[in-house]
Amino acid sequence: MANNEARYREAEQRLWDSVGVTPIERRVHLGRTGVSVRVLEVGEGPTVVFVHGATNGGSSWASLAARLDGFRCVLLDRPGCGLSDPLPARFEDIDELDAFADRMIVELLDELGLETAHVVATSFGGYFTLRAAAASPDRFGRIVEMGWSFGAPILHVPLLMRLGSVPLFARLATRMPLNERAVRAMLRQIGLRGALKSGRFDQHSVDWYLALLRDTGTMRNELAVAPRIILPIRGLNERVLLQPSLLAAIRTPIQFLWGEDDPFGGAETARRFVEQLPSAQLELMPGVGHAPWMDDPDHAATVVRRFLDE
């Protein structure tokens, strides 16, 4: 699929118009990594950096950022995602991914001229955030983790992700034409069934996500650089699980907002994972899936604001 930045920007603009906010766009060059990333900024106040999940983009946070008056929300397109530059080379193994995860957010803070910042993260973004908080604890204020974080034990690896670990299928997936029906099926598999059914993940959001996959290199870039994180038969490569010793070393205050219906891991997974973090607290949301802020953006904003204001 060929990139079409203009078409992507049109869909993204409609999404932001629907939440009544116009973000400020800027480019930030990550010197050590060697790529330019795009960030969108909303509001004024203490800085909160938002780190999205796999095969996604910064505008996935639009409904939450629009509700966080009093904060400067910096929404990152991770390298290779959205309108950020792709990484220059593939991660040859998990160790290389870990080293990048340890430094990426800190490198962004350096380039933004920030000594510290709060972070809101989800899924694969949670992996970057927790590893960075362990490696550089003095750079983080407070952290909010939305839903299951990559690096936690996984209850179920969706078939789509297993197939994506097969090189031939991955290549075909990046060439197949996508339509709204296929995107809705994909979203249901990765934990947004309830948000789609309720209409919280509305037509503007669906159109934006379709444009992200169809009109940017996000999916192609993510598949191109990933080491063997998911295995076709065994599912999650256990090498990426965050070890108890790493979790125990994280002293940054963390608020988890976790949906009990998260297909990657529900209430029991959440309790067992969060109890390993000495400064973390957990709120479970009944009937909510993988993206709590999309199921209930008002409640998610209340939780974020209350926790960061502490």
Image (cartoon, rainbow, N blue to C red):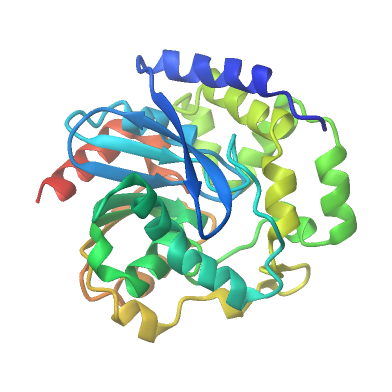
Residue 104 pos. (x, y %): 46, 59
Identified at 66% across, 47% down, the residue is 86
User: Which residue: 55% across, 66% down?
Assistant: 155
- At x 29%, y 48%, the residue is 113
Q: Is residue 207 above or below residue 299?
A: above
User: Up-down: is 251 above or below 89?
Assistant: below
Nearer to the camera, 129 or 90: 90
In this picture, is 37 found above or below 5?
A: below
Q: Quadrant of residue 65?
A: top left
User: Which part of the image, by quadrant, shows the N terminus?
Assistant: top right
Position of 54 with respect to 17 (left or right) is right
Q: How many numbered circles does the render carry? A: 0
Q: Position of residue 112 (x, y in %)?
A: 34, 45
Quadrant of res 234: bottom right
Residue 106 visible at all = yes
Residue 35 located left or right of residue 3: left
Q: Tell me the residue at 38%/59% (across/down).
A: 106
* Residue with the most extreme bottom position: 245
Which of the two residues, 115 or 41, is positioned nearer the viewer here? 115
Tell which residue pokes out farthest to the left in this image.
Answer: 310
Left or right: where does residue 305 sit relative to residue 265? left
Towards the viewer: 254 or 102: 102
Residue furthest to the front in view is 31
Find residue 173 and report its horizontal and vertical position in percent: 82, 44
Measured as percent of width and height from the top left, residue 189 is found at 63, 46
Tell me if residue 260 can be seen.
Answer: no
